[in-house]
Amino acid sequence: MIKRVVLTPQDTEQLANLRVNPEDLKDDFFDYSKVVVKKPWGYEYLIFANDLIAVWILYLKHGAQTSMHCHPNKKTSLVVLDGRAICSTIHEDLDRSAGEGLLIDKGVFHQTKAVSDAGAFVMEIETPVNKRELVRLKDQYGREGQGYESVDQHSWNTQNYNYLSLNSTTVDRYKLKKRLGRCTLTFKRLSGDEGMREVLALNSEDVISVLRGQIVGADNRTVVEIGDTSAAGALMTTRGLKVGHYVELLIIKKIDHIIKVSDYVAAFLNEHKIKGIFLVPGEATVHLLDSIGRHEGLSFICNQSEKSASLAAEGYTKLSAELSALVVSSGAAGLNVLQGVGNAWIDSTPMLILSGQTRTDQHSDGPLRQLDNKSLNIVDIVTPITKYAAKITDPATIRYHLEKAVHLAKDGRPGPVWIDIPIDIQGMTIDASEMKAFSANELPPRVESSPAVVPEILDLLARAERPVLLAGSGIRLSKGEAEFLELVNRLKIPVLTSRRGADVLPEEHEFFFGRPGVYGQRRANFVIQNADLLLSIGSRLSIPLIGRNSRAFARGARKIVVDIDPHELGKETILPNLAVHMDARRFLTEMLSRVLACRGNHTGWLSRCREWSRRFPPLGAGCDRPVKLMPHLVVSALAGVMAESDIIVVDGGSPIHSMMQSFRFKPGQRFISSTGLELPGFALSGAIGACLARGRGRVLCLCEDRGFQVRVPELQTMVDYKLPVKMFVLRSRGNSNVRKIQRDYFGERYVGTDKDIVLGSPALAGIARAYQCAAFEVTQPDELVERIHETLSCAGPAICEVQVEDDQDLMPRIGFTVKEDGKWIAKPLEDMYPYLDRETLKENMIVDLLEED
């Protein structure tokens, strides 16, 4: 319904009392076509204009209202497109919802207030065109007597608003239909009897506004003219209607359930509170990009490449434990994210990937390799490394597949999911009321271990002389950190942490004794190798943790392994004495419900563990005046400087090994890494995601020069979004890990890593400065701590390039015995290089040593 509001004597009197200077109302002919005007109640922007009329979109926040104002010489129409608003005049308040509005005469004072929870979108149609023609009578924001907003309230960045423009001269607007809120907007150019029949065929509640021309009656008198807005039903009561020479109309239709597929996807992301959205623009996702960009509840980061975007999404989720979304185009764009998706699959990271695809009638899933350009059957490629992958072939199934994907991404052992949406389906409209929903009841029930196993475990702990608790990342994935800390304090037994679970317990905790593994700490390896009972919670007990000689791992211990993934419980490298298929948090809760304290006496065992910590401290501890700059010294220095709330994102390879050996975690610190694939280049992109997950707070990044160089373009992303990422780059010549193996086992034949071939990297600090990042350099050990402080204290992104030794030797580590037949036999975890003499090794082993093969 459209109600006409006519000028009253009170309007005229109020305007006269204000004594407005006509010069203040003259048009300044400013071009508003590409800006958003920020208002205290929300914002507005110009969606369309010609020489006679201007059409604006207003967004009012919940409870906010415009000033009580008038336009002395402009006729104005207001039509609500979404939400509900109270449109007031001096005399009355009129409640308006989607598809309803007012036609307001010149000089009438009016005011609009949003009363719906999500605010309201309102279309304003004015003629003639003059934005400065504004007189404010009263205003809750103190703008009485002020003119229209000045240029300092203009935003040329339209991405952060529900922005829609129909001013393009390259697109035929008369062939467009756009949706905004609960209404669709259509332009029509009509003439003759056929044009009038098209108007009369509209639904009675449809709204038309005349942009040019007029509609006249049988007597040729004007019925609807430029700037008039009317419900189509009101015209139908007049006989003999006809179009003047021609007429241009804006037709507004209210839609209750019809929605564009890409708009539904955007609304779905918002409904499921997916805040971390990472994208790279592409032709096959233009509908998704538009819908995400226009949605008020969504924000996004645009990365430089799909690979970087996938790693940023992973970093976001690893820190926040919340689902992230990745939007990429078709063809090679999908292939570019496989590294990040594969890493998320291994590291149990839930991610939703939305890919574009070529048109459904131009895509081949059969033996034909390709029909349309940039077409690729990405679903079959990613199926082995996702928990769910589906291509949308019927737009009505979009809800089902999205709901199923999100459920599976987080259910059980988390992981990535992938939905492929062809470009033509993205742009289709669907009836939301007819979409099928997904139900978790469709899935086979997950059969977990019974809680009745917990008393047996407690009994084993009580009878054990040397129990050890190993904590993995499943504790964080299940959000069981608080329960874990409480259980540790009750059991009072030694605790070790896995690589991804390294930050669940701080160094200062009285029951923490390190991180075991191939590149772990010698103290921790002695603890786990001498245990007679191992309780592992949420760790997949990977080869880097247990060693390649898996039969020697914790060989004197009964092994109780708690894992959400039954496949991890059945692998050959670990054959648990008691396998518990259960979510980590649920297991911890069940344990806490049955134990107040561990019944066993482990005082002597704890004393022995403390002795190992004293004799074999973390690498770098107590090294006051180092002669050479080695990676572990950089890590140790960082640990000393970083605050309790700091987050560090680390590359695979040497940086993660140095972290495992030398970093001393403080309470509240977080460690984000690529542990499964140990990706060089993860840290820079992952730090972007972690920074966003932290509300754009400070994040540290540790990588080698090789990893830095493959992600250099992301410096631009950090600069664009002003992200305070502090990058510490270990610069050396060549691949340190590979060179070490070549030196020890291949006669120092440095194939591909020789200094003559790999001459090191360019001046990394110079690269950073080219991107206008702050840059610092360290070449001597005594400069290190000061440069770390300088890097952390500066604003915005910054890089600290640390020149470390070329011939790094990460110690201690597990070595190999190479037999005469060429077979490599891995040493057990307790026998780390540099090797202790046999007597010293025996002194530190309660469990019998293995005989040399």
Image (cartoon, grey):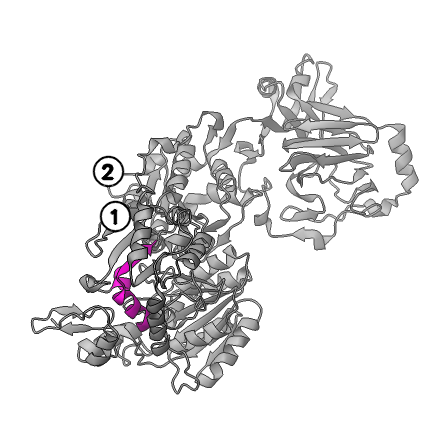
Q: How many marks?
A: 2
Label 2–label 1 contact, CB within 8 A: no
Residue shown at the point (62%, 52%) measured from the top left: 156
- Tell me the quadrant of the picture where the N terminus can be found: top right
Relative height, residue 28 to residue 670 (above, below): above
Q: Quadrant of residue 602?
A: bottom left
Can residue 355 be seen?
Answer: no
* Earlier residue among tags 2 and 1: 2
Residue 357 among magenta residues: no
Residue of label 2? 366
Image height of 809 relative to 233, above or below: below
Q: Nearer the viewer, residue 405 or 264?
A: 405
Q: Amino acid at mark 1?
A: His
Identify the residue shown where x is 74% and y is 33%.
76
Q: Is residue 290 left or right of residue 750?
A: right
Point out residue 408 in the picture as x, y percentages from the top left corner: 37, 41
Q: Mark 2: which amino acid? A: Gly
Q: Secondary structure at mark 2?
A: loop
**Residue bearing the label numbered 1:** 567
